[in-house]
Image: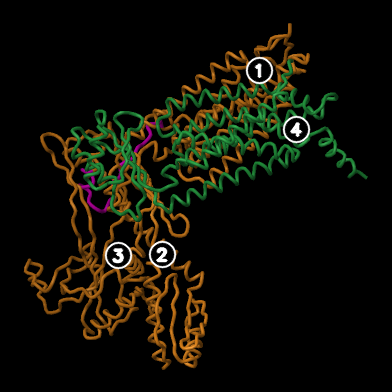
Chain colours: A green, B orange
Amino acid sequence: MTVLDFMGKRKLAAVFSSILLVASIVSLATQQLSLGLDFTGGTLIEVGYQQPANLNEIRSTLKAAGYDDAVAQNYGKATDVLVRLAPQEGEKESIANNIVEELNKTSSSEVTLRRVEFVGPQVGDELRDQSGIAMIVALGVMMVYILFRFHFKFSVGAVAALFHDDVIITLGFFSVFQIPFDLTVLAAVLAVIGYSLNDTIVVSDRIRENFHEMRKGDAVQIINVSLSQTLGRTLITSITTLLVLVALFVFGGELIKGFSIALMVGVLIGTYSSIYVASNILLAMGICKEDFIHVEAEVMDDRP
Amino acid sequence: MLNKYPLWKNLLVVFVCLVGLIFALPNIYPEDPIVQISGATASGKVDGAVLDKALEALGQAGVEVKSSALSGASGVIRFHDGDTQLIAKDLVKSALGDDYVVALNLASTMPDWLASFGASPMNLGLDLRGGVHFLLEVDMEKALEPRTTGYIDEIRSGLRKEGIRYRSAKREGGGKISVKFTDPEEQLKANAWIRENFRQFVISVDEGAAEQFIKLQLSESALKEIQDYAITQNLTALRNRVNELGVAEPIVQRQGVDRIVVELPGVQDTAEAKRVLGRTASLEFRLEDSEGDLEAAMNGRVSSRSELFPFKGDKGAPVLTLKKVIVTGERVVNARSGFDENSRPQVNITLDGGGGKRMNRVTRDNVGRRMAVIFVEHKERTKVRKEGGVFVSEKERYVEKYAINVATIQSALGHSFRITGLDSVLESKELALLLRAGALAAPMYFVEERTIGPSLGKENIEAGLMSVLLGFALVMVFMLAFYRLFGVFANVALLVNVLLIVAVMSLIPGATLTLPGIAGIVLTVGMAVDANVLIFSRIKEELGNGRSPQEAIRSGYDRAFVTILDANITTLIVALILFAVGTGPVKGFAVTLSVGILCSMFTAIVGTRALVNLVYGGRSVEKLSIGYKEAK
């Protein structure tokens, strides 16, 4: 088989990674994430019109009804409208029903309530904390698992790859394009962590195997061979996953648009990072054959 | 090398596929809209007579019924479409009255033989079937208030009785009481007495130059007891109200220390749901109008100072009471059924400080007279009218008041008294429940609401199904093009995989399919092929290393196994974390993802191997149809 010189381009890859990383961090620092209702709290009402909705009329109706801070926009279709309201303490009356009533008064055709989401500010804060914890716990458990299964240099490489692509760059993507970040997107980001780790493990598995089996060659060569061997699989799996994600994005409806975007970005970056980031870090940490022999030597020493 | 599976392994694969098929099958049968009738109380049973009455009402209105049946303690009437079902519910409800809960639901049309396996369709989440999810928070500070006020009263009167002088006793938040003294000696005496009598508090002393304090803090266990009581109380009240809404399969559950989750599938009118859930029934303690003329009142001549109430369930004579209310149910802190000295049932009632005082003031002058407990409920009923050939249902609100107990006042009552002379334990229990149900133990607030309209639910199902099918088709075409016959193996495994996911989702009682759950299935489809890709590329590689086809198959499967295991375990870990911290939709995703991973491990490794062995095993093979081109 042809061995491609992946590691020869590793300086270039490092520059590319850094650019993405810096861009993401800058965006996250300056304009943050556009947090969805789940995390900010507030009220969101989706209504359906029979004909394409007149947004200006809706806005003036809402203003006249005393909902000054209400934001109305189209959602997916011209007949669907999303109304957002800032968080309010202790909602007792049903704001959603009032709003639908008000809109029905001025609309010529019937307005139907499609969806309501109300999250109290306190619940929003809690969900945000929980989610942060979930992300950290997920990364931590992964690191421990790889530590247990592989050499610690792999563990650092894998987690760095995860943190680099899934967490920072995917979040960065959502920040740059200001796509609402809600609970389902978070679930997607966590799924990307799993997916990308999957990739990294397959590659690491091969690298480990080849360090044991290949008599000749230095670390760079061994990693190049391993990456070439797994390249086909990495690409095919990414393609099939992307195929279903595109299907989900196009036909899955508005509610899981964010979810599929997060996964698509994650899978793309994840494929790249499992090739470059993890192995780059392995090399940077000076992985060599002794790292593997050492483990065996220890086992030998234990024998009587 | 021959690559043959032993018979048992092949049988296992066939068996798993068959079981999967049976339990996935119920999902393809359409569901009938039904009206479900059940008793409003645990004892209320629905029998043939009740069902006939309902059917008669429907027959008179000319509503078409598909079929009807009794199942267990409830009756089920099936309809052809949802619109008929809605009207029928209102008709049945007004025909049967308040003793029965009439709910909308869906029932599978699967044949009996399938049901006899215990198979049932998947539970659909609120985002797919439509409905409301509420999260309510109980105001615990308000739940503590009456209790602490009660304790303060006890401390004050106790200290007075002991002749200990204190300046003030007041309530501080969080179940804390602080008593102020100006004389250190008095404080010392009080300290001993309080420690003796208030063991449910943690007591600390605060010495100042001019003032001294004794601080009482309710102990952890006492606090927990009050919180549990408040939550249980509110849960009971909520369940009763939910029953009234007529929702099939509602969920009313405690979540954490001070929250309650209410899920009402299929409910569309959220305003009504909120109103009913937030409603408080109330109680009134009133003196009987002993001078009034009951006979005359029953004939409609009630004097201006009194009011006539029927007795609950007509179990006693109507009661004529004074209009003036002694105390209301909000003053009731606790009501428990128990036994008196002669082991006869009784109900112990505790009022809060203010309520106790007023009760005492009124009753000490009226010993020997009778006192009635009146139950006031704000209800809603639906009326169905026919207007120009179309059924129209209207909601009407009304107040229902009735007496639940009348008893003679034996002595001046305080903040804690009892009602004796009850006939049975059942009666005392019911009375205690009604007294408690009067008011919520503490007010509740809506802190989260998620409503999905029925049309959106339907669209979500369609969108989900569409994306699953399309994603599936794309992956299958790709695999076929890339791996030829081995692609077919992988595709069969993929089909079985989805079949198994659906079967497992239908089998686990608590599992619900949500929209993110469908996304989880789609994602699994994409990722499930990964195991096969790993195996197949390993086989190709082995072929490239010059191995024979049979050897390549064997070592391809063997060597890829560890990698597949490692990769899947990590994804499974993520799924478990998501399940642990996630709520609703995210949980749904975690469930299908983990079920999908487990099923795909079986189908991709064992399932495809069985197929490969079946086709290539046991004979000598020259070439594998795996899309491998020999090096030129």
Viewer-nearest of discs 2 and 1: 2
Residues drawn in magenta: B90-111
Residue A195 lies in magenta, yes or no? no
Classify 10 Å Cα crowding around label 3: few (below 14), some (14-19), many (20 and above): many
The residue positioned 68% from the left and 15% from the top of the image is B616
Co-location on one chain, circles 2 and 1: yes
Classify 10 Å Cα crowding around label 2: few (below 14), some (14-19), many (20 and above): many
Co-location on one chain, circles 1 and 4: no
Residues at marks 3 and 2, CA–CA distance in whole angstroms: 18 Å
* Chain to which mark 3 belongs: B
Classify 10 Å Cα crowding around label 1: few (below 14), some (14-19), many (20 and above): some
Q: Earlier in the sequence, mark 3 or mark 1?
A: 3
Inspect the image, locate mark 2, and give the three-letter code of the amino acid beneath it. Answer: Met
In the rendering, which numbered label is found on residue A283?
A: 4
* Chain to which mark 2 belongs: B
Q: Is residue B120 visible?
A: no
Inspect the image, locate mark 4, and give the three-letter code of the amino acid beneath it. Answer: Leu
Residues at marks 4 and 2, CA–CA distance in whole angstroms: 58 Å
Q: Are marks 1 and 4 in contact (CB under 8 Å)?
A: no
In the rendering, which numbered label is found on residue B73?
A: none
Viewer-nearest of discs 1 and 4: 4
Residues at marks 1 and 4, CA–CA distance in whole angstroms: 45 Å
Inspect the image, locate mark 1, and give the three-letter code of the amino acid beneath it. Answer: Leu
Co-location on one chain, circles 4 and 2: no
Report the residue marked by disc 1.
Answer: B614
Report the residue marked by disc 3.
Answer: B438
What is the x, y in percent for residue B404? 25, 67
Q: Are marks 4 and 2 in contact (CB under 8 Å)?
A: no
Co-location on one chain, circles 3 and 1: yes
The residue positioned 41% from the left and 34% from the top of the image is A255
Residues at marks 2 and 1, CA–CA distance in whole angstroms: 66 Å
